[in-house]
Image: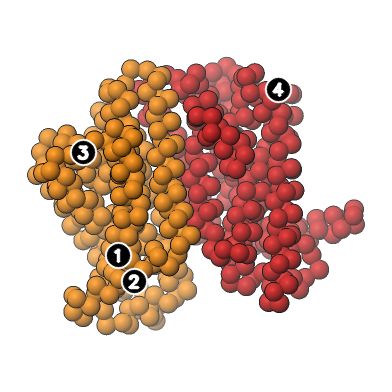
Amino acid sequence: MKLRKYFSFTKVGLGQGLQYRSDTLAGIGATMISLVLFYFVWKAIAASGELATPFSSIIAYVALARVIDNATSANLENWIGERVRKGTIVNELKKPASLRLQLYFYELGRSLFKIVVRGVPALVISILFLNVGLPTLLNGFLFVLSMFLTLNLALSLSYLTSMLVFWTKVGWSLRMMRTMLAGLFSGAMIPLYLVPENIRNIFYLTPFPSMVDAPISIYQGTAESMVQVFGTQIAWIILLSMVAELLWRKAKTKLTVQGG
Amino acid sequence: MLESAKKHLRIYQKFFLMYFKTILVYKTDFLLGVVNQVFSFVSSLALIALIFTQIDYINGWSFYELVIVYGIGRMVIYGFHLFCFNIVFLGEAYIINGKLDRLFLRPLNILFQVFASRVNFHNLSDILASTIMVLYASYQIQVSVITLPNILYLLMAIPSAIMVVAAVILVFATMGFWIGPTKSLVNLFWKFRRFGRFPYGIYSLPLRVFFVTAMPIMFVSFFPASFILNRPEWVEYQALTLFIGPLLFLLAYRFWLYGLSKYSSTGS
């Protein structure tokens, strides 16, 4: 199937946001509210002791983290989980289009919609009220690039976890575990520079910091080496995609053996 | 009235056993649920611990005190999960997909049927783990949880708090009669609840009002915990915790009955 035809899936993904209006509104609400609540939580934390940086820097990081985390959340596990459980996953395989590419372009659409309705307003508010500040023109452009990579990384990760659904048959619990792990390790819940160094180094062994901490470092210009940041993001995308592909092949053989 | 209650209790037993047998069949689901909860337990504790590597108190509350707040909150939430989880699905599975219609056919209270049709056994381990965690944390700071006033208080406060959660979810679910899928609203509640792990005092006044009215999460963990941690500054709220559950649930139940009457009258 031609690449251009896959963009129709992107259109469908974009349309989902407009169709499921209560979901969209709840998503925007959740993003804004989490900004406000995280503000108070970190304000109280910063007031309680001598942190590495003043509150204004912390809240800038936290705000950016919320914007990025909320705008790039991918959820393929439920979609695949439902179809594995009902057995309709075989129908998807019968289609002449690659399931993987279908899902990718579809989620791309959904994520773009989320970035526009959730990410952009939240970013504007953060810049105006939460000391986020504007990046240099170059950093801003590189940030957009990094966000695109983050999106792909989030998709690859979600896709990888979704492959496990073929064995567990349930999507939601895997998704919850992935979200919790990612939230903690990526910088979405606590700025990584506040985490003790030995623990932080363990975090950096995982793909998660590349999803939130990395784009923040590009935006704020705090990255030691932009090349390294981008390189790490790309490396993880490739690695996760390869593992997902391996699992997918195993899952396919499993399905056909069961007479799918 | 008493006869009806006895009948419902007997039937609940049957539902209970029936559901118990299904988990023996769907073992993977059960195990996965347990793994999931262990995960959430550990990652939430890890977050608090990481924050406390940098500071010693948040708004005057120490690490172990906040662990106790977290633990009590978990006991309430998993108590809700244990007995009432099915109402989370009221919007999608029951109202929209029509499963509700079947329940009309039986001579039983409809909401009761929804509650009874699902008992999340895998949450028993969570409640146990949370209790152990609360006991351990209280031991660390030399606060004795196991006193008669505390036990009496918790025996009333925790069921009341469970009813608070059930009331909120029921209201969201009932809105499903009018606005369709309400899963995202319910998820909003879980997202908000996370912030009930932090002291009430850190929030601005409008937020404080919000957290004791529209989203009464503070009754779920903070105020009950403040009682056993001997925090007299919240004594009115600690008392209120005992009554707010039944009160809110009654209101939510009225709303549910209203929605139900509208639903059946549209001739489905």
Q: Which residue is mark 2?
A: A12
Q: Residue B255: where, in percent of width, then height?
A: 71, 55
User: In this view of the protein, can residue B56 be seen by the observer?
Assistant: yes
Q: Which tag is nearer the camera, tag 3 or tag 4?
A: 3
Which tag is nearer the camera, tag 3 or tag 1?
Answer: 3
Upstream in the sequence, badge 1 or badge 2? 2
- The residues bearing labels 1 and 2 have C-alpha atoms spaced at a distance of 7 Å
Q: Position of residue B206 (x, y in %)?
A: 53, 33
Q: CA distance from mark 3 to mark 1?
A: 27 Å
Q: How many other residues sit within 10 Å of disc 1, few (<14), some (14-19) or many (≥20)?
A: many
Q: Nearer the viewer, mark 2 or mark 4?
A: 2
* Alpha carbon distance from label 2 to label 4: 59 Å
Pointer 4: residues within 10 angstroms few (<14), some, or many (20+)?
A: few
Q: In the rendered structure, the residue with mark 1 lies on which chain? A: A
Query: In the rendered structure, which disc, 3 or 2, sits on the residue that comes first in sequence?
Result: 2
Camera-nearest residue between A121 and B183: A121
Which of discs 1 and 4 lies nearer the camera? The answer is 1
Residue drawn at x 27%, y 82% is A96
Instruction: Classify mark 3: residues with Cα within 10 Å, few (<14), some (14-19) or many (20+).
Output: few
Q: Amino acid at mark 4?
A: Thr
Amino acid of disc 3: Leu
Q: Which mark is residue B147?
A: 4
- Tags 2 and 4 on a common chain: no
How many labels sit on residues?
4
Measured as percent of width and height from the top left, residue B24 is found at: 59, 61
Q: Tell me what residue is drawn at x 26 percent, y 47 percent.
A: A211
Q: Quick check: marks 1 and 2 in contact, CB under 8 Å?
A: yes
The label shown at residue A134 is 3
Quarter of the picture holding the C terminus of chain A? bottom left
Q: List the residue tagged with mark 1.
A: A109
Q: Could you say whether the residue bearing mark 1 is in a helix, strand or loop?
A: helix
